[in-house]
Image: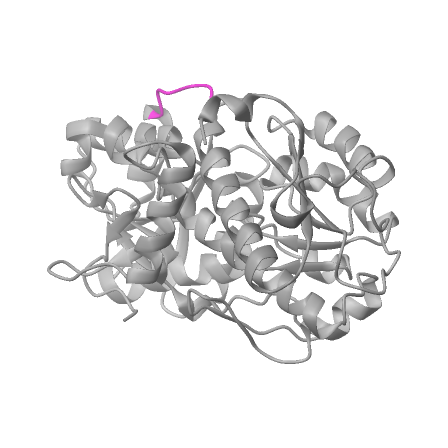
Amino acid sequence: MSSHRQRIVGVITVGALALTACGGAGAGSGSESSSDVVLGWSGPFSGPLQSLAETNQAAIEMAVDQVNEDDGVDIKLVVKDDALSAEKAVTQAKQFISEDKIDVMMGPAVNTPFLAAQPIYHNAGLVQLLVGTAATGITDEYPNTWRLFFDGDAEARLIVERLRDHYGSTKIAILAENTGSGLPGADSLEKAINETDGVSLATKQLFATDKPDLGGYVDEIVKSGADGIALWSVGGANTANVVKALAAAGVTTPVVGDIGAVFKATPELAGDALGQVTLDAATFNTELYAEGAEPDPKAVALRDEVKSRLNVDELPDAFHLALMYYNAVHVFKEALKRSDGKTDPDALRAALVEGDIMTPLGDVYTFSEDDRNGYAPENLSFASIAPGSYNDGFWVRAEGAPGE
C-alpha cells in the first residue's frame, strides 16, 4: 500500500465490510452481534511523524484483516489525520462520534491531540483503547480509557532504575522537550527520582524543540554535577539534537531515554556524534534481539507484512508502536468475543477485566477495574541506540538490560 494514499483524510473499510455503507452502531449503542462494528483511529499523517503513522496504520489494517477473515468479526476501520493538532483532534472527535458513529476509538496516537479531544470522547461514553499515550493519570480520570501501552510513571521508574542499577548514577538530571508529551514525561521522571532510593535530582531542563542548539541546557547539566541523564523526547530528530549537543560539549554522562528515542531516524540524524554518547532507551521486548541471535519470528513476519502493505523495502520509522497497534486490534476482538458482540461501555469493560488476553505475538494484557493499564512494565527492556544498532525494525538489546 503506497504511502501517498495516507495524505488524505477519510474512511478506510477493511475485510468483510469493504462494500458496506458507513452506518453502524453508534457510540455506546451496544449492538447485539459482532457484525458492523466501527473502529476509529487517528494518527499524525501530516507533519514530522507521517511515516510513523503510515507504519502504524499498516499494522492496524493487517490485524483487522486477520480478525475479519479468521474470527468471523466484521470490523470497519475509520481513519483520520489529526496532524498533531489539538484543534483538529477536537473537530475530528465530534465527526467520529456523530458522523462515523464509531463504537470504539483507538487514540488519538500522540498526547497533544489526545488530551485535547479526550473530554469529547469521555462525554460520549465511548470506550478508548490507548496506544502511544503515556500521559499519567488518564486511566484514573476517565473510566472508559484502557491503555495498551504503559503510563509515564511506570516508564520513568524503569529509566531511573536503569541509570542507578546499571550505570551507578546517584545524581540524575532530567532533560525533556517542552511539549505536550515531554512536560508530563518530565514530571513523571521527577516523581520517580524522588521515590527511588539512592538517587537525587540534579537539575530539570526543558528544551525547546524548535531550537536545535541545546548547548545552554547541556551547560546547566554539567554545572549540576549530574552523573546520569534521564531523557524524555519524541522522535528521532529531537533525540538526535540532544546527542549532538552532548557530544559537542564533550559530555560522556550516560543517557537513558524514554521510548521516544527508539526511532530509526535517531542514529541516522545523530551521525558520528552517537559514537561519543552512551544512549539506552526503553522499548518493547518484541522489538529487541540480542547480538548473535535472531529477532522473534512472529514479529519478523509482522514486520515483513507491514513492509509489503507499505510497498517499501525497509520500514520507514519506528516499529514498536506498530506492534502495539496490532495487539490492540486483537485485544478489541477478544473483548467483542467475550461480550457477544456488544459494544456498550459496560459490556466491554466487563469483557476486558474477565481475564488475561494474549495476542498472536504472545503479549499478555491484564486489566482490572482498579487498573486499566493492561501492559506490564516488565515486558519492557532497553535498546542500545548506537551506530549499527538498528536493523530494519529491530534494535540490539542494551548490555545488561532485562528481558529474554
136 horizontally vs 308: left or right: right
Image quarter where the C terminus lies is: bottom left
Residue at 65 percent across and 39 percent down: it is 13
203 horizontally vs 169: left or right: right
Q: Is residue 122 visible?
A: yes
Using the rendered view, name the quadrant where residue 398 is placed.
bottom left
Magenta region, residue range: 210-214
Residue at 56 percent across and 40 percent down: it is 183
Which coloring applies here?
one colour
351 horizontally vs 53: left or right: right
Eyeballing the image, is 153 above or below 101?
below
- Residue 208 is situated, as x and y percent measured from the top left of the image, at 48, 25
Using the rendered view, name the quadrant where residue 309 is placed.
top left
Total number of numbered discs in the rendering: 0
Residue 211 included in the magenta stretch of the image: yes
Majority secondary structure in the magenta region: loop
Residue at 38 percent across and 46 percent down: it is 305
Residue at 89 percent across and 56 percent down: it is 29
Which sits in the foreground, 272 or 131? 131
Q: Is residue 219 visible?
A: no
114 horizontally vs 262: left or right: right
Which sits in the foreground, 173 or 210? 210
Eyeballing the image, is 338 above or below 214?
below
Which sits in the foreground, 27 or 204? 27
- Residue 264 is situated, as x and y percent measured from the top left of the image, at 31, 37
Which sits in the foreground, 252 or 18? 18
Eyeballing the image, is 319 above or below 166?
above
Image quarter where the N terminus lies is: top left
Eyeballing the image, is 144 above or below 351?
above
- Residue 378 is situated, as x and y percent measured from the top left of the image, at 42, 70
